[in-house]
Structure formats: C-alpha cells, structure tokens
Image: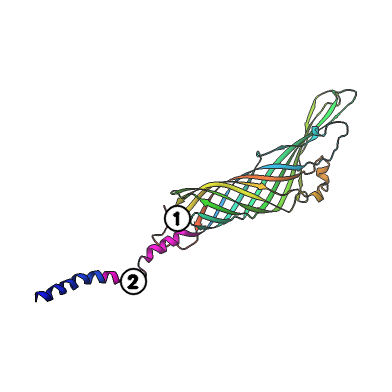
Amino acid sequence: MKRLLLPVLLVLLASPILAQRNYKRPPGFNKTRNQALVFLEKQWWLGFRAGPTLSGAVVNASHQVITPTNYDPALISKRYRDYRDPGFQATFEVTFTFRDLSVSFLPTYRTNRFAYTNTYQWADPEFESHYLELHYEQISKLAYIDWPLLVRYEFPLSRVRPYVQAGIYSSLRVDATKTVNPSGLDRASGGDNAFQQEPIVAGANDLFAKNHWGLAGGGGVFYNLGNVRLSLEVLYKKGMSNIASPDSRYQNDRLTGVGDVPDDLRLNTISVTVGCLFPLRFLQSGFKSTPD
C-alpha cells in the first residue's frame, strides 16, 4: 500500500500545475482594456476658432505713376506701415489625430489690412519757400478664403498640451477695396495753408490677383476640459507669390489719378486665435477623448 501511495500523491500534486500550464485564456480576455487604448490613440475633431490678424507687405518691385527726372525717386517712394492695421479671421477646423500627431484642414475667412504713405511736392524754382505738398495715405483691405493643410505635433504633458505645426495654404481673393486719405500743405502764396480732403474709397478687385499661396507655421496650447479641447494659437503665414495683378495695374482711373498703383508684393500674416474642438468619434461612458 505504501508503494502505491507515493505515485498517487505525486499525481495529485502535479495535476494543478499541468492544468495551469495547459489553460487557455478565453477569447476577449483583457479585450476591454486593449480596445480603450486603441480608441484613445485615434480621434476626429471638429471645431471653430477666430481672432485678429496683422499684416506685413514685402515689396518685390516698386511701381509709380509719376517718374521724376530732376530729383531722387526715393523722395516719393512708398513707406509701408506693417503689422499695425488689424484684420480678422474665422476658421472651421477638421482634424484627425493619431497619438500625438495630427493632420488639420482649416478653411478660413481672412481679412488683411496694410497701408503705405507717399508725398509729392511742387516748388517754385525762384522762391524755394513757395511750394505745394501733397500727402497720401493708402489703405488696402483684402478678404480671402484660405485652404490650409497643417501637420501638428503635441507634447504629451497633462491637461495642458503645447503643440507646434507647419504646412501650406492656398488663398482665393473674394474682395478688395482701397481707401486714399489725401492731405497737404499749400505754401504757394507764401503762407501756411494745411488742408484735408475727403477720403477716396474705390473697389480694387482688378488690382489684386485672384489666387496666391504660401507657407504656414506656428504653435499654441490645448487645454483638455473633459472631452472638449480649448485652444490658444499663434500662426504665421508667409506669402510666396505676388498678390498684385500686373496686367491691370494701371486700369483703375480713380486711383491712378491720385498717384496710386500697386507694387508687386507678397503678403505675410500673423494671427492670434482662440477656439474650441469637439470629438467626433462616439464616446462611451468611462471614455475620455484624451488621456489626463
């Protein structure tokens, strides 16, 4: 009997170990956790953002109505006023995010305002103190529909997530106006007579190109408020093509009459926007669109 007891005892001890080694986990084991992780790695976002813009003009070639013959042309050259006249932009955003990398399509309505001044002077050759000086402030207001495509990288910190982004955009001009504010000083008779004329406002669609394109880059920060994302962003758009229309440069009689024709120039834009993004994928109870 003792000889049989030892083998039976060994079999009883080994059975749980063999059963544990041969045990197969049922389908779906830990499936819920894996699905959650995969779900949080990908997301579609839909949102809106808006804010002010500031514009700067980069002159490729300067053009004038008046060509001086007896003095330096620099005396009547245009002096641009950059990044001082505010515009506005509103953006509709569609973004796909995979982990910390996103691709965004951002149709945007954008207005730009930039200005320049120039001065003309006619003097009596016999009496230098007798002259007529005309000063013009020329303000251009342009409206565009932009089609930017940007790639964004987020730094995975916590609720506050900084990001950087870069991409390309194409613009469609939808409206353009020019406002000219003439003023001057009349000393032709020897006295000082300052004057201010009524502004000249003219449609200028024919003076500006229908399309242009450029590069974009910038950064910002997201704040995750539950499943909603709030954003603060600074974006710089660098124009890469001429926004003027060379073929119709001299065709606006009202503006050429006051000495105005557009230069060949590129337009740069700085925008500061605030926005809100909403997740599009269905969120079940217990899921969050982004990890804390």
Query: Element type at marker 2?
Result: loop
Query: Element type at marker 1?
Result: loop
Dot 2 surroundings within 10 Å: few (below 14), some, or many (20 or more)?
few
Q: Where is residue 103? Give x, y as percent.
A: 56, 56
Q: Where is residue 215? Give x, y as percent.
A: 64, 50
Q: Main secondary structure of the magenta part?
A: helix
Quadrant housing residue 26: bottom left
Q: Does residue 194 sit above or below 164 in this rendering?
A: above
Quadrant housing residue 19: bottom left
Q: Residue 26: give its label.
A: 2
> What amino acid does circle 1 point to?
Thr
Q: Where is residue 17? Give x, y as percent.
A: 24, 69
Q: Nearer the viewer, mark 1 or mark 2?
A: 2
Q: Residue furthest front?
A: 3
Along the line of sight, which residue is nearer the eye, 291 or 227? 291
Asked whether, in this view, residue 81 is left or right of residue 133, the answer is left
Give the position of the N terminus as an image quadrant.
bottom left
Earlier along the polypeptide chain: callout 1 or callout 2? 2
Q: Residue 238: give its label.
A: none
Range of residues picked out in magenta: 19-43
Which residue corresponds to the image point at 70% horizontal and 42% vertical from the top-left?
57
Q: Is residue 20 magenta?
A: yes
Which residue corresponds to the image point at 49% horizontal and 54% vertical from the top-left?
100
Q: Is residue 129 magenta?
A: no
Which residue corresponds to the image point at 35% horizontal and 67% vertical from the top-left?
29
Along the line of sight, which residue is nearer the eye, 2 or 104? 2
Dot 1 surroundings within 10 Å: few (below 14), some, or many (20 or more)?
many
For mark 1, what is the residue? 290
Q: Where is residue 160? Give x, y as percent.
A: 46, 47
> What amino acid does circle 2 point to?
Pro
Looking at the image, do the residues carrying marks 1 and 2 touch, with CB atoms under 8 Å apart?
A: no
